[in-house]
Image (spheres, helix red, strand yellow):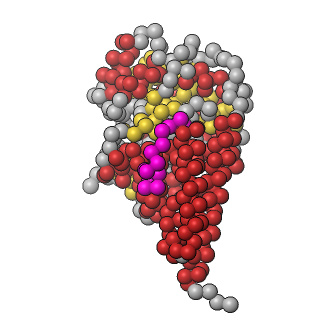
Amino acid sequence: MSFSPTAIASGVVLALVAGAIVYSVLSMLAARNYLRARRPAGATTEPVSILKPLAGLDRGLESNLRTFFEQDYLAFEILFAVRNASDPAVAVVEKLRGEYPQVPSRLLFTGEPPYPNAKVFSLEQMLAAANNDLVAMSDSDTRVSADFLRTVAAEFRDPALALATCPYRAVPGASFWSRLEATGMNTDFIAGLLTARWLDGVKFAVGPTIVARRKAIQSIGGFSRLKDYLAEDFVMGKFAAEAGHRVILSSYVIEHHIGSTDFQHNIEHRLRWVRSTRRSRPLGYLGQLFTMPVPLAVILCLVKPALWPISAIAFAVRMAAAYVVSARVLHNRLNWALVPLEDMIGFFFWLAGFFGDVITWRGRRYRLTRDGRFELLAPQ
């Protein structure tokens, strides 16, 4: 028996669509499992050091930082780090320090980083100056409510816990590209975190906010081990899990304000994301194909129009999964029209991730290596 190329192609695509439907169902079950997990009970007064690496003026920076000064928690300090006194973020920090004199805070000038990852260098300097064992590393574009420290510190009442990574709700700016990217973050990306947590445990971390024990960071070789990695957040969680530490996806959802990017910067960010992800998790990156039911359903309709009911099922299940993850887990209002559009664009960027090794980050160009490390390129 022989099969035509069309029959073989339609069979392969049909199998991929079936796998994508299964994944969407699993992501909904994973979301339910996360929501049903026991939340931390009781309270703790363990002191916490908040580490804030800064570089320039993010949109809404003052509002973002203010939420950390206004924590409803007894004992905490905030450390900020910039490269030099000319950074415009300095004026914002000094203004807030003046408004909240009751909150212990310090501003460090780190100078130029001696290795590629400037964020890791800032974190290394702040950790050395921090007074407490429990540290919350949080990016400048994050925003929290007053119970943030209360919630995450309570999770660390478990003596086995070494690192907690906070899921996040992406808050877009006014631009169309920002809203589109936020849709992908709030549906597809978070679904992947929840599914990985449910099926294989948490063996990763995500960057906007990570809370960890100092001894856990030291046990994996300190920040110096992360200095050459672009996805330092992911490998921090990976190394901690490999060292036998308990890593969790926190019950606290932060806000990640991604700003109002234009088309060019959106492309740069997406390419940086897919190229770094492919090198950090090569097999996982291939598996991302099953997280794309909408483009696979479209391809199935093109190669075998008679199978459109299966494509319709894939589309419906994907939209249901997007709602469960975005609305139920992140408490985010879902823009239904943007979901399939973002899925299609995301598919093409996924393909683009297999090509090229140069990225742009904060105006500088870097080359990625196969193991996820990166190096600064000389200016053109």
Against 225, residue 312 (above or below) is below
Q: In this view, does 101 lie above or below 154?
A: above
Observer-nearest of 124 and 335: 335
The residue lying at 59 percent from left, 55 percent from top is 317
**Residue at image location 43% in from the left, 50% down from the top:** 338
The magenta-colored residue range is 330-342
Indicate left or right for 66 with 73 as reference: left
Residue at x 70%, y 35% (from the top left corner)? 37
Q: Assign the C terminus to one quadrant of the image.
A: bottom left
Label the magenta part by its dominant secondary structure.
loop
- The residue sitting at the bottom extreme is 1
The answer to which image quadrant residue 53 occupies is top left
In this orientation, does residue 7 appear? yes
Q: Residue 268: percent from the left, percent from the top?
A: 36, 52
- Residue at the far top: name it: 102
Q: Is 355 within the magenta? A: no
Expressed as whole percent of the image width and height from the top left, the position of residue 315 reads 54, 58
Q: Identify which residue, 46 or 29, lies in the foreground.
A: 29
